[in-house]
Image (cartoon, rainbow, N blue to C red):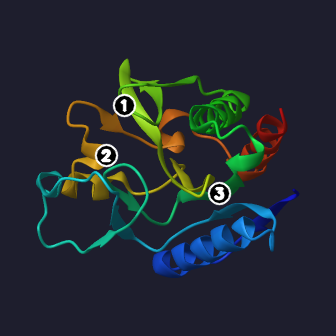
Amino acid sequence: MKIEIKKSIKPVNYLDAIKFLEERVDKINKNEANELIWLLEHPAIFTAGASYNENDVLDKSINIIKTSRGGKITWHGPGQLICYLAINLNSRNKDIRKFINIIENSIISSLNTFGIKSKSDRDNIGIWTKLANKDMKVSAIGIKVKRWIAYHGFSINIDNDISNYKKIIPCGIKDKGITTLKNVYKQDYYNFPNEIIKNLIANLEN
């Protein structure tokens, strides 16, 4: 099945995006639509995954949208790249672990192209890099699988305001920090989304 590439120029409302994504999953299940890679940004919003803990909310005044994805609480907003996926694992040996590895390796390869060394972490899912000799998270991953179709996806902090993370314990991780690509290496990231798409497609086809 072909993979549709979708890029949204204007920020997309979170609930509208999830509704579109869930409808696409149902259509893929019925063989009525192609798989999907969708790049976008959201207006500022806090979202909570299936395993979030209310103790991870430090600022009780914030509004939180509960979602069906895996993971805990995080923030989305301007300057952060969102990549939503709808990928049929029925035709990929129903291998969830391999699919997560594909996401991780695609992000790591893309960052390497831009001169940033990074790694995945089995204990703290996401992609991590070094800043001032400390492990800092630059990408969060949250996936849900329905009838062996994997969806939701990942976010990458490019040039967003990380002060929003002080209102929560992001992804439930207390002892590690969060940063942006611009903080790690000041350069133009205009072509970064295209690099992500290229690596995702290459890895999904392997």
User: Which residue is the site of mark 1?
Assistant: 124
Residue 150 point in image, percent of width and height: 60, 53
Which residue is farthest top? 133
Which residue is farthest right? 2
The image quarter containing residue 37 is: bottom right
- Given residues 35 and 196, the one toward you in this image is 35
Type of amino acid under label 3: Leu
Position of 175 with respect to 157 (left or right) is left
Is 202 rendered above or below residue 43?
Answer: above
Picture residue at 39% right of the left edge, 31% below the top = 136
User: Which residue is the site of mark 3?
Assistant: 85
User: Which residue is the site of mark 2?
Assistant: 171
Picture residue at 33% right of the left edge, 66% below the top = 46
Position of 40 with respect to 50 (left or right) is right
Q: CA distance from mark 3 to mark 2?
A: 20 Å
Q: CA distance from mark 3 to mark 1?
A: 21 Å
Q: Of marks 3 and 1, which one's residue comes earlier in the chain? A: 3
Characterize the local packing of mark 3: few (<14), some (14-19) or many (20 or more) Cα atoms within 10 angstroms. Answer: many
Residue 158 point in image, percent of width and height: 54, 49
Query: Quadrant of the image for the N terminus?
Result: bottom right
Residues marked 2 and 1 touching at CB (< 8 Å): yes
